Image (cartoon, rainbow, N blue to C red):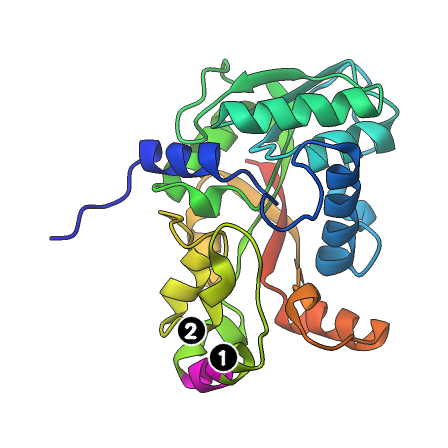
Amino acid sequence: MEKQPSIEDVKNFWENNPLFSGESQYEVGSKLFFEEHRQIVLEDCFAGRIPDELFIPENLAKDARILDLGCGCGFWTVELQKKGGGYKNFYAADLTQKALELTRKRLELYGLNANLSIQNAEKMNYQDGFFEHLNCQGVIHHTPNMSAAIKEIARVLKKDDTAYISVYYKNLLIKNWHYFAWAGKILYKVRVRLKGRGREGILLATTPEEMVRMFDGKENPVGKAYSIDEVFRLIDPYFTIEKTYLGYFPKRILPFKLSAPLHKFLLKNLGFLLYLNLRKK
């Protein structure tokens, strides 16, 4: 039987292959690196503008405790702090030290602060009900036990508190990749590439599972996509779902430009991320 990846495998990969490394022409951790990353996230995920529904709920006090779980290179930590005008008790956590180093640099560039710590999403060391809001974008589909991570997210929130999360979604393209693999080979031959972390050959993947895992790196140990029903079953014991929508279509890998209307259509109907606004039961 093939050995299943462990949380240590996940940690080792991301420690050595931080988010956006290998994609940018700029030095990892430089201001230009962060600015390029921000522009790509805005364009590929949201067609230029983050939806208001993804920011921290307006009714939260400035001294509310907020967690950005899986902060990566600090995009959401900075964007949420900037939008909110600076929260007094903002926390950012990740599995790797490298992510915290990048997040700290990004915060410093914008004169912002956060409480940073190493955390395993499957088993955090925060007290029960410690946070009033939790943000976790594109993270828990990389952990070996996503069910445990969702349970932990619920544990560190109080009843009626909120969590905004996103996971890879089994859209029409992903779940039927075995039918589209021939097109991937053609695109690869005309030099369509996804740069960084050894992903150049992703279009040669032959199965949906391989394609999703390779999206974050050739040696990425865990990367899964979920159907809406699968996600709902995992979430239902702990949360009510207040809103869902699709986003993220990586137009940057295409050899041609997408018009804004077409890109927005693809985000809405063929998005690679399922966004969920949740409230703890």
**Closest to the observer, 101 or 198:** 198
The percent position of residue 206, horizontal first and vertical second, equals: 36, 74
The kind of secondary structure the magenta stretch mainly shows is: helix
Residue 180 drawn in magenta: yes
Does the image show residue 225?
Answer: no
Q: Amino acid at mark 1?
A: Gly
Q: Which residue is mark 2?
A: 204
Name the residue rendered at 82%, 18% in the picture: 62
The correct choice, above or below, for 142 with respect to 206 in the image is above
The percent position of residue 178, horizontal first and vertical second, equals: 39, 80
Q: Residue furthest right?
A: 85
Of helix, strand and loop, which one carries label 2? helix
Q: Would you say the residues marked 1 and 2 are in contact, meaning their CB atoms lie under 8 Å apart?
A: yes
Q: Which residue is mark 1?
A: 184
The percent position of residue 12, horizontal first and vertical second, equals: 38, 33
Magenta segment range?
A: 179-185
Q: Amino acid at mark 2?
A: Leu
Lateral position of residue 25 relative to residue 231, left or right: right
The correct choice, above or below, for 245 with respect to 188 in the image is above
Name the residue rendered at 53%, 76% in the picture: 172
Query: Which of the two labelled residues, at mark 1 and mark 2, occupies the earlier sequence position?
Result: 1
Image quadrant in which you'd find residue 145: top left
Image quadrant in which you'd find residue 45: bottom right
Name the residue rendered at 53%, 70% in the picture: 171
Q: Residues within 10 Å of mark 2 (few under 14, many from 20)?
A: some
